[in-house]
Image (cartoon, rainbow, N blue to C red):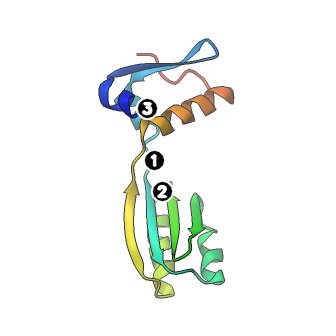
Amino acid sequence: MNVVQDTCQRVIIINSGRIIAQDKVSNLMRLFDVKAFKFVAEGRLSENLKQALTQIPHLALVEEEVDTIITLNLEEPRNFYRVVELLGSEDVSLLSINRQELNFEQVFMEILGRSENGGEKMAAL
């Protein structure tokens, strides 16, 4: 899919013999331009903090051996600051905060998923 994103200007996506999307790659990417952030916190989080964080919509929390990864799809900008505030309230050290970039494969899978759930044709330019 990276080849499509890097070399094609327009795409047609067909599912079960039906055209479900037809547009410029850049336009399809923009349709699903989700502002997502990945926070990497040092160590494990307290149960109270995990419970508070999981109350924030569109947030996923994964504890690894050494660090904790928090992914937030930013539907509401204030949620970004809420995560930072909660982490700061317990003096959690942040190792990094990165904006997650969408790739064409994720867009493709999202379009297929929507079409299989009865979604309309995405675009026709």
Of 16 and 36, which appears nearest the observer? 16
Q: Which mark is residue 70?
A: none
What's the distance in space between the residues labelled 1 and 2, CA to CA?
A: 7 Å
Q: Amino acid at mark 2?
A: Leu
Outermost residue, right direction?
117
Query: How many C-alpha atoms fall within 10 Å of the one at disc 2: few (<14), some, or many (≥20)?
Result: some
Of 52 and 67, which appears nearest the observer? 67
Residue at 47% x, 83% y: name it: 92
Query: How many C-alpha atoms fall within 10 Å of the one at disc 3: few (<14), some, or many (≥20)?
Result: few
Name the quadrant of the C terminus: top left
Q: Is residue 96 above or below residue 7?
A: below
Residue under pointer 3: 1
Residue 1: image quadrant is: top left
Q: Nearer the viewer, mark 3 or mark 2?
A: 3
Residue under pointer 2: 74
Residue at 51% x, 31% y: name it: 108
Q: Earlier in the sequence, mark 3 or mark 2?
A: 3
Q: Which mark is residue 34?
A: 1
Cβ atoms at labels 1 and 2 below 8 Å apart:
yes
Q: Is residue 30 left or right of residue 44?
A: left
Q: Amino acid at mark 1?
A: Val
Q: Is residue 44 above or below residue 119?
A: below
What's the distance in space between the residues labelled 3 and 1, CA to CA?
A: 19 Å
Residue at 39% x, 75% y: name it: 95
Cβ atoms at labels 3 and 1 below 8 Å apart:
no
Q: Is residue 117 above or below residue 60?
A: above
Q: Is residue 28 above or below residue 12?
A: below
Residue at 62% x, 76% y: name it: 50
Residue 87 coordinates in the image, percent (x, y)? 49, 79
Residue 24 coordinates in the image, percent (x, y)? 36, 23
Residue 115 coordinates in the image, percent (x, y)? 62, 26
